[in-house]
Image (cartoon, grey):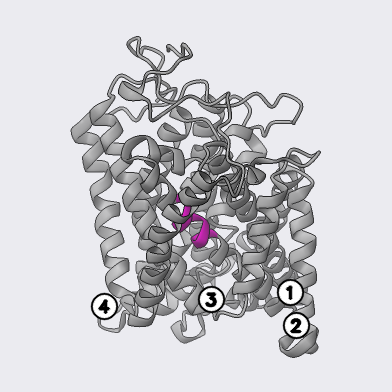
Amino acid sequence: MLDNNIPEYVGLGEGSSHNLQKYQKVSVIPLVFLIFYEVSGGPFGIEDSVQAAGPLLALLGFLVFAIIWSVPEALITAEMGTMFPENGGYVVWVSSALGPYWGFQQGWMKWLSGVIDNALYPVLFLDYLKSAIPALESGLPRTISVLVLTAILTYMNYRGLTIVGWAAILLGVFSLLPFIFMGFIAIPKLNPSRWFLVNLDSVNWTLYLNTLFWNLNYWDSISTLSGEVENPGTTLPKALFYALILVVFGYIFPLLIGTGAVPVDRDLWSDGYFADIAKMLGGVWLRFWVLAASALSNMGMFVAEMSSDSFQLLGMAERGMLPSIFAKRSRHGTPLVGILFSASGVILLSWLSFQEIVAAENYLYCFGMIMEFIAFVKLRMKHPAASRPFKIPVGTAGAILICIPPTLLIFVVLALASPKVMAISISAVIIGLVLQPCVEYTKRKRWFNFSMNSDLPDIHAPDHQCNEPWIS
């Protein structure tokens, strides 16, 4: 809902999109595919949902979870991202509602979660190649390959969001096209009765819920690029809407093909099984295409996630939360120090196992989402008339109700975590609680240079008034 009839009010975030006209802004279509890769990257990795619960619950799960989790998160991101159209995204939302201390905690948990997530993709890329190149399975060749691949993808981020955005479009089209071909080939072989197979007594609920959650989150990550978006007040909501349709279609359609055209053996449904289905339906060439799409999809997810992580650090530096060196841009308009910092984190964490990475990032991500929901509701209650270029068409009670289903889901995910993951994640949270006072201490001692971007409004001023007029 684009809100054009808002009462006159001192806008909390209006004017936040700083003046960077010399750098090319991101338009709708590249933004759609950046969101697509932040959240999904295609159906690669959803096979475990069928193994855990069977075809019916897998199909229903991606529909129901999209409604109770993805839709609320995307709507809140659209409202808050257009209310505060600046790099830093959810860090700025939480800072405005709960204060800079909790804004820093949000930034720490979300950045760490993103870097942990990004550590997956070079490893998964090599996992797809090791069947053709066995030397990549372990040892020095694998280590060198991880470093080289990380360096190449990091360089793409350095060259600018425009290149990253159009690369995401090409990779997205290449990754989804083989499933369109599979759909046409599968039509004569479809047996709709297979879609309704279910056995509640054999459901692995932990694997099922973790698979759904991991494949349908991170909608808010695009908010850290709001300052780089062309006309964010209208572009961001549109891109989120189109990306939501693309993501859900990109999950449901391959599941319908795979479970309907081939006899269902749940034990076979694990990572990479779509490539086997492609071979059964279309032959070796289609299997190769799916494998290549899977590998390249990991590249798309890496560059999209690194863009979000590095621009988040830039946004925090522009707010004076981090040393100003993180706000410096390369000649391509990209946050060079933030990119290098995020790449270093990826390399350091690449030794973790897949299961440990997913569980740890989910746990930290959940903590961050709880603070986002609190910030969203608090700003609705405290400043209901603030300028919101996009506004969810509900009142305060409706805003609270929107947050209840995903919050309940968060508590379920947290409860399912293993003691080891809980211990690691809570330790990371404690580090953040201590880190912020340490950063403030270095600021007072002037060990590092900190500065506030003069183009940004003061979201912490009394009554949210600012020395500059930013009236809606």
Looking at marks 3 and 1 on the same chain, the residue that comes earlier in the sequence is marked by 1
Q: Which mark is residue 262?
A: 3
Work out whether residue 9 or residue 199 is closer to the camera in this orientation and state it: 9
Work out whether residue 427 or residue 256 is closer to the camera in this orientation and state it: 427
Stretch of the chain drawn in magenta: 107-114
Residue that carries the numbered disc 4 in the rendered image:
200
At a point 59% along the width and 24% down the height, the residue shown is: 231
Within 10 Å of disc 3 (Cα), the crowding (few <14, some 14-19, many 20+) is some
Residue 68 visible here: no
| C-alpha gap between disc 3 and disc 4 | 22 Å
Residue extending farthest left = 397
At a point 27% along the width and 37% down the height, the residue shown is: 377
Contact between marks 2 and 4 (CB within 8 A): the answer is no
Note whether 295 is above or below 37 in the view shown: below
* 109 inside magenta stretch: yes
Residue 47 visible here: yes
Circle 3 — which element? loop
Contact between marks 1 and 2 (CB within 8 A): the answer is yes
Tell me the amino acid under the disc marked 2. Arg
Residue that carries the numbered disc 1 in the rendered image:
146
| C-alpha gap between disc 1 and disc 2 | 6 Å
Residue 62 at x, y = what percent?
A: 41, 59
Residue 280 at x, y = what percent?
A: 65, 78
Work out whether residue 112 or residue 185 is closer to the camera in this orientation and state it: 112
Main SS category, magenta section:
helix
| C-alpha gap between disc 4 and disc 1 | 41 Å
Q: Which mark is residue 142?
A: 2
Looking at marks 3 and 4 on the same chain, the residue that comes earlier in the sequence is marked by 4
Tell me the amino acid under the disc marked 3. Val
